[in-house]
Image (cartoon, helix red, strand yellow):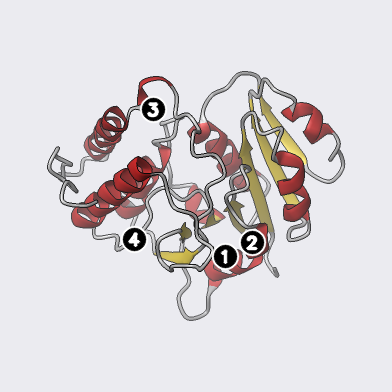
Amino acid sequence: MNERTLIALPVYNEASHVEDVLEQVLQNADDVLVVNDGSTDSTALELAAFEGRIHVETHSTNRGYGAALTTAFEQAVRYGYDVLVTIDCDGQHQPGLISEIASLVDDPNNPVDMVSGSRYLHDFDDNSVAPADRRRINMQITNCLNEKLHLGITDAFCGFKAYRVSSLTGLDITDTGYAMPLQLWIQAADLGWKISEFAVPLIYLDEERSFGGSLDDAVARLAHYRNILNAELSRRGMTQRFTAECGQGIG
């Protein structure tokens, strides 16, 4: 990587994965930031073993996935990085792909503001099978985003992304939870970001991972996502709306 690239991992109670994931990340990156989002297990102890090799930002309480990513955005801007790569710490992304996804931000043939990983752009031989409700909701929301915002994407929720850091200054992310990517897509469309996708394997290691409270119910989660989308459209003064029918023909 010729440009200054920061690799950021949001972490919440990932003691069972963090050591292995970080060892792999450090084989593929020089500057690594971990945002410890108020973990209550032994994650902090695991991170302490990497002192001097990574930088850790700690939230004193669990603020949510979106809040952890926002901290990563702020750190990348504050310290003058050119590219930010975000990768989850649950073992579902492949650190060996970090250099490749980062390089695509300044692809000489197609420079972009964001490269978004997609688990559905290519069918890898060793792909996992996504839990049915997650796959269905992802398809429905992705279809709605494409229909309303003409994004042409295939995966609305993949956390493996690369950003042009100078573009991050235009964002105003307020959602602190798992719906944060929906705000991101709307703001990226409104800001006129150039976006490309990057095929990544579909890996599920923890199919029972909780979204928290009522959001573990698929119907409630889909309704919540539509509410977040419509609230963000209103906040940005955009006229489109996501109705209950949007994406219902998918999956």
64 over 197 or under it: above or below: above
Tally the numbered discs.
Answer: 4
Q: Quadrant of residue 119?
A: bottom left
Checking the image for residue 153, the label placed there is: 4
Q: Is residue 136 left or right of residue 196?
A: left
Kindly identify the amino acid type of the residue bearing the numbered disc 3: Asp
Q: Nearer the viewer, residue 173 or 205?
A: 205
Left or right of residue 18: residue 148: left
Earlier-in-chain disc, 4 versus 2: 2
Residue 48 versus residue 80 in the image, above or below: above
Question: Where is residue 69, by image quadrant?
Answer: top right
Contact (CB < 8 A) between labels 4 and 3?
no
Which residue does the numbered mark 3 point to in the structure image?
216
Lower position in the chain sequence, tag 1 or tag 4: 1
Of tags 1 and 3, which is closer to the observer? 3
**Mark nearer the viewer, 3 or 2:** 3
Q: Amino acid at mark 1?
A: Ile
Label placed on residue 181: none
Determine whether 101 is above or below 62 in the image.
Answer: below
Amino acid type of the residue tagged 4 in the rendering: Ile
Residue beneath disc 2: 98
Which residue is rendered at x = 75% and y = 25% of the image?
42
The residue carrying mark 1 is: 101
User: Where residue 48 sits: x, y (%)?
Assistant: 83, 32
In this picture, residue 196 sits left or right of residue 75: left
Measuring from the top left, give residue 78's x and y in whole percent: 64, 43
Q: Nearer the viewer, mark 4 or mark 3?
A: 3
User: Mark 2 and mark 1 in contact (Cβ < 8 Å)?
Assistant: yes
Mark 2 element type:
helix
Q: CA distance from mark 3 to mark 2?
A: 30 Å
In the image, what residue occupies the spot 72% across and 54% down?
25
